[in-house]
Image: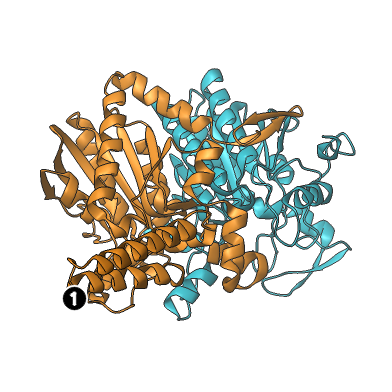
Chain colours: A orange, B cyan
Amino acid sequence: MSEGMGGWLDFERPLVELEQKIAEFRDFADGEKIEIRDELRRLETKAEKLRTQIFTGLTRWQRVQLARHPRRPYTLDYLQRLTGCFLELKGDRGFGDDRAIVGGLASFRGRKVMVVGHQKGRDIKAKLERNFGMPHPEGYRKALRLMEMAARFGRPIFTFIDTQGAYPGIAAEERGQSEAIARNLLVMARLPVPIVGIVIGEGGSGGALALGVCDRTFMQENSVYSVISPEGCAAILWGDRARAPEAAEALKVTAQDLSKLGVIDGIIPEPPGGAHRDVDAAATSVGDTLDSALAELEQLSPAELVEARLQRFLAMGSYLEDGLPKGLGHS
Amino acid sequence: MAWFRRGKKGIKAAVDKKDMPQGVWLKCRECTEILYRPELEKSHWVCQKCGYHFRISSRQYFQLLFDEGSFVEEDAGLRPSDPLHFRDSKKYKDRIVAAQTKTGLDDAIVSGRATVDGIPVSIAALDFSFMGGSMGSVVGERIARAAQRAIDARRGLITLSASGGARMQEGILSLMQMAKTSAMLAKLAEERLPHISILTDPTTGGVTASFASLGDVILAEPKALVGFAGPRVIRETINQELPEGFQRSEFLEAHGFVDRVVHRRDLNRTLATVLAFFGDAPMPTGRLRRRQDDH
């Protein structure tokens, strides 16, 4: 690795530095020499220990940082690895094409599927083009158009969720950001084809949920999903966005939290150090999850599918009825 | 669970003290006119000078919208729990108790059935005075049940919104109420039953981005703040001042997201007309005030 230390998180930096040292050592030193081999083994053991030390017991805020990692794979990184063919389709047929959401026709392990997902940009130019992965209404309307099309032709749908949230701007409000999100929630609830969603990074509030009314929802190990960003929550509660780490704790935003609450169907393990350390391996795990979830859902008739989806979302909630605990999260 | 129980039985008017100052003389928040309370009550809490619509409680709306004595509360046994054990400067549990004590409500919603000009409806109304009308599990559940009851009894559903959005203290479960309420509205639509959404000041966030924007007919009170993101968030994001009238009902009507901006005094007649259209009752004639800009 010839790159500098940019684009790494503070807490993973010692590990990355050590790994770079090992790589350099291996490149330049004579690997035949026994003492060098011993030294390499010693360093690798050290790296392994450091990795375990850093990545077990991550705080919720560290998970948020990993979910937002500048090197984290985005929707198109997964599609590139998971689909045999991907033909992007653009536009909402009303206003324009929102580059913060991508979608199209794909082949996936012998099946034909419709795929839609949020898309972030890697460099500055791409970030601007993708509006930092924050869609406008036309993005949600494009997604809806593609999903309805899939339903009409009996094709299952995969959604990849990765956004800070729907864009809060003047144009977005003028074009009905609320209506666009709400419409997706309503229509997705009744589409007569299997829908599997994966949170691959940030599941930011309504802007994420607008692709999230699925029969099965999974989260990658280092992804987060939340009703409000930790910064936004901290601003409201304490008038101080810097207290986001505390808000992340209170909001319980991690895959582990949501799994425990019963809101998602499973956690997709990531390679050691996170999805960005081995994108191919991360993609394989995501693909295997999509594959098995779809195989399960294909056993259901369209009517069963839609009814089960309704029941799934009706069960979401936690309250007391006549003093008795009902719903999720009472354990 | 004794701390969840209401101290007193019976109905108290849910009135936010901040919005509804006590005393005979009140100042309009918009034009600062000094108003005489009995007059204000007669005009349904609308400033006679500038037309500012004061924030009122769900119970006050029921008096305005429904046939006298027709409202029957349903699903009243639901109370919030604290699935995340949420705590900021205060515990969520304590916030709930404080809000219950302040408002006399169990949560930010009152739901049930009533009649409008004799037409039966299901109703779910939010109360802004209870934690900003925020939608948590109880709000979502009662809306979903109101929709189911509408389906069972073959009647329309009215939702009345006043909310800052999803309730962050219930975390992801609050977000999921958006999907839950919307899914039930999809079912209601399949049953060919109408949903009429009334937007009042303010309606933002997860409530606007779910059931409130999904009315077959969407009505809004004049000058109500209605939007996805709050004005403060937008201002901070784009770093410039927002245009005059941005995110007000009239703005939404102009952009095609609200069917009609309706003065509070006309809400009942408008509702009766819409409900009559969808059902068997004859349409009322010649009783609806025309707005100046109607054609």
Residue B171 is left or right of residue A81, and the answer is: right
Q: Is residue B123 visible?
A: no
Question: Quadrant location of residue A154?
Answer: top left
At 50% from the left edge and 45% from the top edge, which residue is drawn? A256
Residue A307 is left or right of residue B106, and the answer is: left
Quadrant placement of the C terminus of chain A: top right
Instruction: Please provide percent x and percent y for residue B290.
Output: 50, 52
Instruction: Please provide percent x and percent y for residue B91.
Output: 75, 53
Q: Is residue B192 visible?
A: yes
Q: Residue furthest front?
A: A34
- Answer above or below: position of B241 versus B187: below
Tell which of A52 and B7 is nearer to you: A52
Residue B217 is left or right of residue A77, and the answer is: right
Instruction: Please provide percent x and percent y for residue A135.
Output: 33, 60
At 42% from the left edge and 67% from the top edge, which residue is drawn? A12
**Chain of the residue under the numbered disc 1 shown in the image:** A
Which residue is the site of mark 1? Answer: A28
